[in-house]
Amino acid sequence: MKKLLLVMFALTMSFTVNAQIQTPAPSPASKLEQKVGLTDVTIEYSRPSMRGRTIFGDLVPFGKVWRTGANARTKVTFSDNVTVGGTELKAGSYAIFTIPQKAKWEIIFYTEHQGGGAPQQLDETKVAARIASDVYPMEMDIQSFTITVDDITNSSAVIGLLWEKTYVPIPFEVPTDKAVMASIESALAGPSANDYYNAAAYYLSEGKDAKKAKEWIDKAMSMIEKPAFWQLRQQSLIYAAAGDKKGAIDLAKKSLAAAEAAGNADYIKMNKDSLAEWQK
């Protein structure tokens, strides 16, 4: 009887531990990802519903800071610096707080994006940007709080806040033209020192045309103001592979001197070993 009671108790405890009732969240989480020009924009927020309630001016009071959603703070992340209302926001994540009014809202980008709800008192040192935005009434109700990214161009877009019969736009600009122009100038200027260096190093490691590797490494080094000891080491190895032992020795000596100045024991040893081999 005692054993039976113990078994029944164990089964009951197992059922209690394993039983998990799952129900829908009243304000489900949402994640919006949008590319604007070359900038990644991600918005993470929770979506409360009207459920027969009056929202603005009641559930969400006028004149008070609102978390702009439910549960955790609504968070927007930009992969590049962007401009909002003439203010530059550095790449990174921000909480979006709002102060709703009947005709105009204040939008606040806040650096402390972690946490739930809006702080009782905003820390002005954490306010990255403030803008004012007009309220646009809509004819139909939006039952669930919704954030959109619309009116997308190569250099701008609009974050839209929609709930009840209210639409509030938050325009922002992205640095697409600056990035594209820099890319064009870089491409038209030809391969960089890094491109030539990597190509030469690959040819050496794969046993390909050593003379071509030597041509590329020389081109790379001519574009570098002060080559580092590890770059000189790579150049010396390519010279040796191309059959230019005298050039390899001169470069190994330069690499050795630079490695000694930097206090890098590994490169000091490697250069001394190579010099001993090549000077035989």
Image: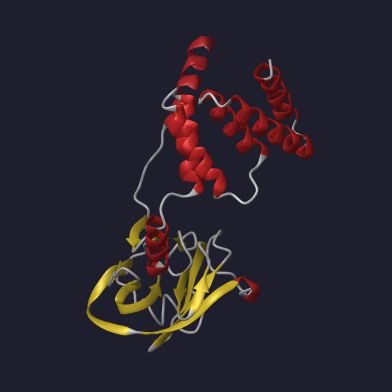
Q: Nearer the viewer, residue 275 or 68?
A: 275
Way the structure is coloured: secondary structure
Which residue sits at x=50%, y=16%? Answer: 5
Which residue sits at x=37%, y=55%? Answer: 31
Residue 165 is at least partly visible in this image: yes
Q: Relative to residue 221, is residue 42 drawn left or right? A: left
Question: Compared to 90, does 220 lie above or below?
Answer: above
Q: How many marks?
A: 0
Question: Compared to 130, does 280 lie above or below?
Answer: above
Question: Compared to 267, does 55 lie above or below?
Answer: below
Q: Which percent across, then down, holds residue 273?
A: 70, 20
Which residue sits at x=47%, y=39%? Answer: 216
Q: Nearer the viewer, residue 79 or 208?
A: 208
Residue 172, quarter of the rendered image: bottom left
Q: Which percent across, then down, holds residue 143?
A: 27, 68
Which residue sits at x=69%, y=22%? Answer: 275
Residue 41 is at least partly visible in this image: no
Question: Compared to 111, does 87 lie above or below?
Answer: below
Q: Relative to residue 163, is residue 252 drawn left or right? A: right
Q: Relative to residue 121, is residue 7 drawn left or right? A: left
Q: Which percent across, then down, holds residue 210?
A: 46, 27
Quadrant where the image shows the C terminus = top right
Residue furthest to the left:
139
Q: Which percent across, then down, holds residue 89?
A: 51, 70
Q: Nearer the viewer, residue 242 or 200?
A: 242
Residue furthest to the bottom:
103
Residue 58, quarter of the rendered image: bottom left
Q: Relative to residue 81, is residue 263 drawn left or right? A: right
